[in-house]
Amino acid sequence: MSPRPRRTAPARTLLGLAGLLTLGGFVVAPARAAVDHCQKCHSEQDGKAGEAARKYAADIHARRGIPCSGCHGGDPNDPEPTGMDPGQGFRGVPARAEIVGLCVACHADAARMKRYNPRPYIFSVDEFRTSVHGRRQATDPKVATCISCHGVHDIRPHTDPASPVYAANVPATCAKCHNADYMKGYGIPTNQYSLYVRSVHGQALLEKGDLSAPACNDCHGNHGAAPPGVESISMVCATCHGREGELFAKSKMAEGMKHIPTARGCETCHGNHGVKHPTDAMLSTAAGVGACTGCHEPGSTADRATLFIASGLDTLKWKVAGAESLLAMAELKGMDASLGRERLRAARDQLIGLRAALHAFDGEQITSVLQTGFEHATAAREQGAGALRDWRVRRLGLAAALAVILVLIALLVGRIRALAVARSAPGPPGA
């Protein structure tokens, strides 16, 4: 068997792009073989070929009945080496520039993908072209291709915890490229992973196992991966933080940030890869502590507004805590505090609503939420105090009733004793 002619780098690049742009660069025939002799033979070998064949048994493509020839060509029904002849369509190991076109030939074909899933994910070439990875396919030999993220011969569904694109594995998968060594010379930050693992999102996903927490692809996209633009950052965040995003989008702050080159929406106050759990300390006016101090000078209108909001927030929290204490004490003494609890829940809802309303940057709206919260917290406190007053009244009434009962018992006992003495006394002589 003559060796397969080696394509030059430009030829491989052009062939890969042709497959990507026309979807016709590869004719993949995922026909089910009675016995996949490619895998059977290579599984008995040592080296990379043997390892790849053994891994392929667990690959999603193998489990769907697609033989090795689905990607490498050749005849899987031929048990002889002639199955790898170029005349049998054998391609061997695809060049890096060919990989995207090879995968697209199936995964962008809706009719073909529906053979395996009635509601399949259909790869979008147009979406991929918008990504940094897609735009650099023809010029950058280090840029990510399909196998960089999904693997090669042991590709798993994204729902499989062993898959590199399983939600909890995505950050580490991205970090295989986005690190200081691999990205040397690109002039872009490489500390994303180290920041993310310490962020509120990273802790939720990687430590607590919350698969609803965002990973890299939730903000940057999957096959259309790209850094969010300045105007789109708040929209990206709003896909999860809907109420805050909607309020911010309508705010004067959002409009004003469009004219400030260094302002980047939500990122300006919360950061990006290293987002920390937001606390009320972000409203502090102390330099280096509060989020507002990074832009607004001490004594400015914005600084005074921040101080007012922080003071109102602390007051509402104090009122809520006071009401909780009184209601808990009343319940401990057996009193019904259900009405007070309803008002306290409403007050807490306003406390949460206040933290969301901050993103509107609207003094009137924030003051309204504060006022409503004060009203509910005050009513809850009064309910608790009233329940405790009722308890004291009942206690005094019970004590008075007990005293009356004891007096009556004493009188009754005294009367009984007097009668007993009278009966035991000797009668007059001659009686």
Image: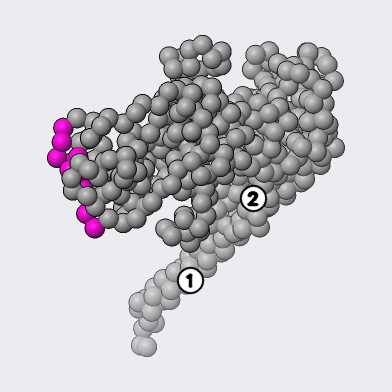
Q: Please tell me which residue lies in front, 229 or 223.
A: 223
Q: Is residue 210 magenta?
A: no
Residue 286 x %, y %: 68, 15
Name the quadrant containing residue 325: top right
Residue 89 picture location, percent across and down: 35, 43
Which residue is identified by label 1?
412
Give the residue at x 64% y 30%. 228
Image side of residue 323 versus residue 196, left or right: right
Q: Which residues are magenta?
A: 34-46
Residue 256 drawn above or below residue 421: above
Q: Is residue 299 left or right of residue 203?
A: right
Tag 1's secondary structure?
helix
Query: At 47% from the left edge and 59% from the top edge, which residue is drawn?
Result: 114
Q: Nearer the viewer, mark 2 or mark 1?
A: 2
Circle 1 Cα neighbour tier, 10 Å, few/some/many (<14 / 14–19 / ≥20): few
Residue that label 2 marks: 345
Quadrant the N terminus occupies: top left
The answer, for residue 60, to whether it is visible in the render is no
